[in-house]
Image (tube, rainbow, N blue to C red):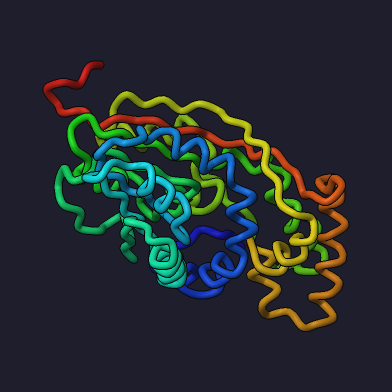
Amino acid sequence: MNVAKSNDEQRALWNGHAGRAWVTAQDVLDRMFEPFEELLIGEVAAGSNLRVLDLGCGAGRIARAIAGRLGPDGVCTGIDISDPLIEAARAHALREGSRAKFVCADAQDYAFEPESLDTIVSRLGVMFFENPVAAFANLRRAASDGAALRCIVWRSAAENPFMTTAERAARPLLPNLPARQPNAPGQFGFADRDRVDAILRQAGWAGIDISARDLACAFPAQALDRYINLLGPVGLALQDADEPTRARVIERVRAGFEPFVHDNEVRFTAACWMIRAQAVSTGRAHG
């Protein structure tokens, strides 16, 4: 059994359990991914009047931060396939008085205005496209001449043991957990650097630079059970598990995470690629 999912399946997943789980665990995820946020926000010049897209924006934390960083004529729009997450993003923006805007749609085929974007950022949001070349070609058409693409994605599962600890620990009790399929849409779908480079080139992007980043992440240890219960393949499988099985799985998975627990924090290194590319008109392109 593999975890390759079509766009329709991704839409169903993120408008079902996965989307609701990310809303429920948003405080944990925001804390865990703070280093990602700092990297991406730093790619947008303070006071600039850029038109920015946050791709796979989730509950909108990065979009709101970028919107607050832009000049008076700048705008940041978040796009995500998950209605629960977009609803949460809009509620946060309203509560904070943020200028960020949000759209619930699939960026692979969304009808962006041509040349309407100056910067596209994404925190772990671009690995799920059924047809990544088509998706990045669509984004390229939406990009203005010289526009910047800045995305953070996971490297391989082998380089991110924290992210597969739960399923490895739980598999004896949940034998039907789906196996990871290399290069399939999903968390590690962009692990192959050469493949990502080829996707971007085929989609019309230039100036491509894909560099390794190792980011120190942490969240409160008291949130670990919530993380196990809600997120990833194990969190999804536990929705259909009976209570005795759930209790055994959580106990076993919690023990699997023990090497990552230090004092009152869960700490791990996120092995990622930082993707940089540029939209360059044919007349200006080189090489």
Q: Position of residue 195 (x, y in %)?
A: 44, 35
Relative depth, front residue between 48 and 29 = 48
At 67% across and 71% down in the image, what residue appears? 237
In this rendering, would 50 be left or right of 20? left
At 46% across and 28% down in the image, what residue appears? 210
Q: Can residue 9 be seen in this view?
A: no
Relative depth, front residue between 42 and 127 = 42
- The answer to which image quadrant residue 133 occupies is top left
- The answer to which image quadrant residue 229 occupies is bottom right
Q: Where is residue 164 in the image (x, y as percent from the top left)?
A: 70, 51
Quarter holding the C terminus is: top left
At 56% across and 46% down in the image, what residue appears? 188
Vertical placement of residue 53 versus 206, above or below: below
Quarter holding the N terminus is: bottom right
Q: Where is residue 123 in the image (x, y as percent from the top left)?
A: 48, 46
- The answer to which image quadrant residue 3 occupies is bottom right
Q: Position of residue 8 (x, y in %)?
A: 39, 68
In this rendering, would 248 be left or right of 50? right
Relative depth, front residue between 89 and 208 = 89
